[in-house]
Amino acid sequence: MTRTSLIWSVVGLGLLAGAHAGEPIPYEVPKGAKAVMKKGRQIGWAIGLETNPLTVLKAEPRGSQRARAIGPLAVDAQFRPRGITTAQAWEKVRAELKKRMAAYFGTLPPRPAPLDPKEEQEEEDRGEFTFRVVSIAFDKEHRGRIGLLEPKGIPKPAAAILLNDRWGGGIERAAKGVYSRAIAAHFAREGFIVAIIEHWDDRFGDSRSLCTAGAATHMVLRTLDYLATLKGQVDPARIGYWGHVYGADLIPFIASHEDRLAAFVASCTCHGIVRHYSAAFWSPPFWARQGDNMGIATRTTPRMYYSARSVATQPLPFLTQEMIAFVAPRPFLAINPDHPDLFEAVRPVWKIYGRGQFLEVIQHKWGTNEPVNARDHTVDFFLRTLCGIQPGKAPAATVDAILAGLRAEALGQKIVAARLAAWWRSKEATDSLVALLDHKHPVLRRAAAKALQRIGAMKQMAPHIRHPDPMVRLAAIEMMQLVGTEDVFDALVADDQDEDRWVNEAKWQTLQVNPWE
C-alpha cells in the first residue's frame, strides 16, 4: 500500500465515524462559563480569560408582541396577519419573497451551464495544506476565480467552507496574509477544505442586466456547482458558508437561492432591525425607508445592490427580518453583529421548525478581526452542524481508534488520528500527541500541535513557544489567548519577538490579553 493510500485509509470504523455528516448538534455552554448580567438579568455566558472573553448571547425572553416579530412583515404595502405559526405558512411567504428577490437581482445567467474550469495558479505546497487558484465560467463573457485550500491528512470526502471575505482581492490575503486576516489558512489548518470566492467588484461590477448582489450570489452558486464536480474530495452534504462584512451581508441573498449550503456564519454583519412604530405594528409599511436596515449595503456601499443596472435602494422591496429568515431552519452563527436583537426578532422562524437553538450569536472585543477564541468557536460550530461532531464528547470507540491511530506505524494513520483528536478535543490523546511534536514529518507535528491547542493542553505546550517549527510555536501562542496563565505570559514577554511574521503578530495580539498587567 502506498503512502498516499495510507493517508486516506480507514484506521477503524470508530475513528472515521465522527468524520461523516450527522444531525446538527446544538451548542452546549461549557463548564466554567460565567454568567453575563445586564440590568439584573442574564444575557449570556462569558467563556475564556476575563480580559479576552467570548460572550455567547442567550436568547432573552420577550413580551408576546416581540416574540411574534416575524408576523407583521410588510410586502406590497400590506401587513400580514400577526403571528406566522406554521412552517407551511412561512414557506408560502418565503416563496413570495424569493420571487421578489429574483426580480430585484435582474437576469441571472442560466444554470446549469458549462463551468469550463481552468488552472490559473498551479498547486503550491504550504505545509499543512495545498493552495491553488482555478477559474470558472461566470457566464458567457466573464470568468471568476476561486482559491482552493486542501488540508493534508483528512478523511475524505471532507467538509468544506465557502469563504467570502471583505472587499475584493482577498484570495491571496485570506490564504497567506496578515495573521488575524488569513482566515482561509486558519480554517485549512483546522482540517476543512476551503474555497475562497472572488469578490463581485473584481469582475462583475459592470453588468447592465444583473445587480451586483445578484452577481455575487450567482458566483456562490457557480462555486457550489464546481465543488460538486470534486467527487471523492468534497462531501456535497457538508458545505458551509463563512462571510465577513460584505460577505456576511450577502448571506440572506445567498440563502434565498441556495439550499445546498448546510450552515452559515456571518462575521461583523451590519444588518439592523426595522423596529415597530406603534403597538399595532412591528415594522413600517413598504414605502418607509426600509433600505436603512440593510446595513453597509445602503449605508456605505450601495454598489452591493446596483451596478451599471440601476435599481432603487430607497426603499428596498424587503426587510432585514424577512431576508435573514431565508436561512431557516439551517444553523446560523452571527459573530459581532451590530444589532444582536435582529436575531431574536427572527428566532421564531427557527422555532417554527423546532430548531430555535440553531441560531447562535457571539461577541468578542476585537472588532472586525477574527481572534482565536471566535475562530475556535466557529470551528466547533461547523463541526457540530456539518459533521455531527460534539468536540469534547468523543464516543469511547472513537477515542480508542484515535489512540490506536496515533500509535500506528503508518504515517497516514497518525496524521488522520491527530486531525480527529483535534476535531473531537480528545484529551485522552494528550500524551501521544506530545510525543509527536518533534516528529520529522512537518504535517504530523503541526497536526499534533493543533490538536493540543484545541484540547487546551497549556502545561504541555507552553515549553514549545521556542520550538523550531513556526507553526508549532503559533499553536502554543494561540492557546495562550484561550487558557493562558501568569507563568506562560511571563515566558512570552521574555520572548516577544519572532522571525516568522505570523507568529510575531500572534505574540503581539496575545500580549494584549495579558490579565496580569
Image: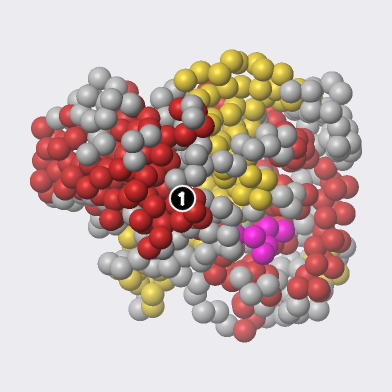
Location of mark 1 (residue): 12
**Residue type for callout 1:** Gly
Residue 231 drawn at (x, y percent): 68, 37
The image shows residue 286 at horizontal and vertical percentages of 81, 61
Q: Nearer the viewer, residue 400 or 390?
A: 400
| Residue beneath the point at 52% across and 47% down | 267
Query: Which quadrant of the figure has residue 72?
Result: bottom right
Residue 177 painted magenta:
no
**Closer-to-camera residue (230/161):** 230
Q: Which residue corresponds to the image point at 73% horizontal and 79% vertical from the top-left? A: 85
Residue 318: percent from the left, percent from the top?
77, 57
Q: Residue at x 62, y 78 (%)?
A: 67
Vertical order, 494 against 388 (above or below): above
Q: Is residue 181 above or below residue 371?
A: above
Nearer to the camera, 71 or 296: 71
Q: Is residue 50 visible?
A: yes
